[in-house]
Image: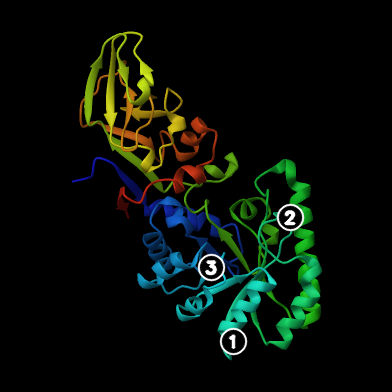
Amino acid sequence: MLSNTYIKINLKNLIQNFNFLKSKISKKTKFMAIVKASGYGSDATEIAKCLEKNKVDYLSVAYLREAIRLRKNGINSPILVLHPQLDDFKEIIEYNLEPNIYSFKVLNEFLNCRGQNFNYPIHVKFNTGLNRLGFLYSDVNDLTKIIISKKINVKYIFSHLAASEDKSETEFTNNQIKLFEKINEKIEENLNRKIDKHLLNTSGILNFPEQEYSMVRSGIGIYGYGNDLVFQKHLLPVVSLISTISQIHKIKKGESVGYNRGFIASGDTRIGIVPIGHADGISRILGNRKGKLLVNNIKCDIIGNVCMDMLMIDISNLDCNEGDEVIVFDENNQTAEDFSKYSNTISYEILTSVSNRIKRVYIS
């Protein structure tokens, strides 16, 4: 029996998205799937297991703890840790993970832990315009001197595009690509060898496929979201958030609903109590008729203030009963992208805000 509130994870859609994105690149180009933030709010382990069965080349997470959890759950694929902290490297090596080295300080900490293990692979990140983590072009000469002198195994260099989904920023993206090429040329000249690299994210795969290099990376795309309607029809949402009506009340004119009397009935009103709240990722911003949930394919306003563990919806204009299904977002009727517009945010935030206390159900 399903829980009153649950997340449905459609692994068939995951595989469809994975195969569609792979169809946009050469068969020789490797594919890295991003499974950070609990697999974008789903379940990193189950996502990783499914992708591993379908021969993904690489996985990636933000932080060490995420990677260790995957290893402890039997995931054997190469895993890139995108944001290692200074005291992580002993465990990174212990669990056979590949760190992103993004500064000289981080590089020194890695070398201190690496010891004589000269062959241990790293990825080196360069900042080409996003202005988050990464070495600069001006660092290349000093960096390559250390790489040579310390016999460092640089497996990949990489960078991250800031606006590959935005066609009005094509010039900016092209300038990032040019700078990355310039960095690569200088590194290969200094090291006197070819080096593997990865640059493209989901929108990069779709909009700049000629820059696929040795590997591409996809996060939001494998979970079913792109930034272009041309491609969106080929991407199927993986995650649905479903709840139910726990109880129905009839509210008379002048009566209030919820904390701080956030809703005052202007007339006789029928409300449904739904067991999901801001502790589960439903922002308080969505209260007071800003957000809508679906009951029997009818959009129902969230009324009053969203509580920690539940919320209230206006069901005055539809025929429904206690126990009926409530869709927060799903594959077809109201996707996470649709739901994100109620709070002026993006699908990423909606997906990754969903609480781990909610039961996960898998469709395979």
Left or right, 65 with reference to 200 = left
Residue under label 1 = 119
Q: Earlier in the sequence, mark 2 or mark 1?
A: 1
Q: Which one is nearer the viewer's eye here, 303 or 260?
A: 260
Please state the horizontal and vertical placement of residue 65, each as a whole percent of the image.
Answer: 44, 66
Which disc, if any, is residue 81? 3
Residue at 75% x, 79% y is 144
Q: Earlier in the sequence, mark 1 or mark 3?
A: 3
Against 85, residue 340 (above or below) is: above
Which disc, if any, is residue 345? none
Residue at 59% x, 57% y is 24
Q: Which one is nearer the viewer's eye here, 15 or 100?
A: 100
Q: Amino acid at mark 1?
A: Asn
Please state the horizontal and vertical placement of residue 304, each as a whole percent of the image.
Answer: 37, 23
Residue at 74% x, 76% y is 143
Q: Earlier in the sequence, mark 2 or mark 3?
A: 3
Residue under label 2 = 129
Q: Amino acid at mark 3?
A: Val
Label 2 and label 1: CA atoms lie apart by: 30 Å
